[in-house]
Amino acid sequence: MTDTATTPNAAAVNSALPQEELDRLTQDIVGALKTVYDPEIPVDIYELGLIYKIDIADDRNIAIDMTLTAPACPVAGEMPGWVQNAVGAVQGVGDVTVSMVFDPPWTQARMSDEARVALDMW
C-alpha cells in the first residue's frame, strides 16, 4: 500500500487511486473540515489553519494532523472527535485517524484571508 501525503492545497504523490478520485476526496474532506468550528472563534478550523496534514491512503483511510490555537484550549479533548466524525461522514472514506500536534505551534499567520476577514484582523 502506498500512502498519499496530501497537505491542504498540495498535489497527491504516488497513489494507486485515480487523480480524479483523490481530487474529489480531498475537496469533500476539506468541505467536511469547514463544518467544524472552534466554539470560541466564529471561523472553521480549516480556514483558521488548524489542519496541518491530510493523508489519503490507497485504502481510503484518512490520517489528519491538526493543532489548536492554544494547547490549553477548553475543547482540546473533544475537537479531534468532531473532526473524525465530520470527515468520517464523507462518502468513500475509510477509517479516520486524527492526531493532535503542537509542532510547529499555531500562529495567526496560518489563517486564510477568509478567516482574517471574518475576524476583522487586517
Image (cartoon, rainbow, N blue to C red):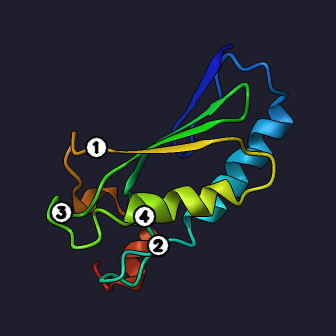
Q: Tell which circle, 1 or 3, labels the residue nearer the N-terminal end.
A: 3
**Local SS, label 3:** loop
Q: Is residue 1 visible?
A: yes
Q: Which residue is mark 4?
A: 112
Q: Tell which circle, 4 or 3, labels the residue nearer the N-terminal end.
A: 3
The residue drawn where x is 30% and y is 62% is: 77
- Measure how far apart labels 4 and 2 are at the Cα level: 10 Å
- Which numbered marker is on residue 101? 1
Image position of 107 (left or right of 22):
left
**Local SS, label 2:** loop
Which amino acid is tagged 2? Asp
- Measure how far apart labels 1 and 4 are at the Cα level: 20 Å
The residue drawn where x is 79% and y is 47% is: 24
Q: Position of residue 102 (x, y in %)?
A: 22, 45
Figure check: 29 above or below 60: below
Which amino acid is tagged 1? Val
- Measure how far apart labels 1 and 3 are at the Cα level: 11 Å
- Measure how far apart labels 2 and 3 are at the Cα level: 15 Å
The residue drawn where x is 39% and y is 65% is: 79
Q: Position of residue 78 (x, y in %)?
A: 37, 66
Q: Position of residue 103 (x, y in %)?
A: 21, 39
Q: Position of residue 107 (x, y in %)?
A: 21, 57
Q: Which residue is mark 3?
A: 70
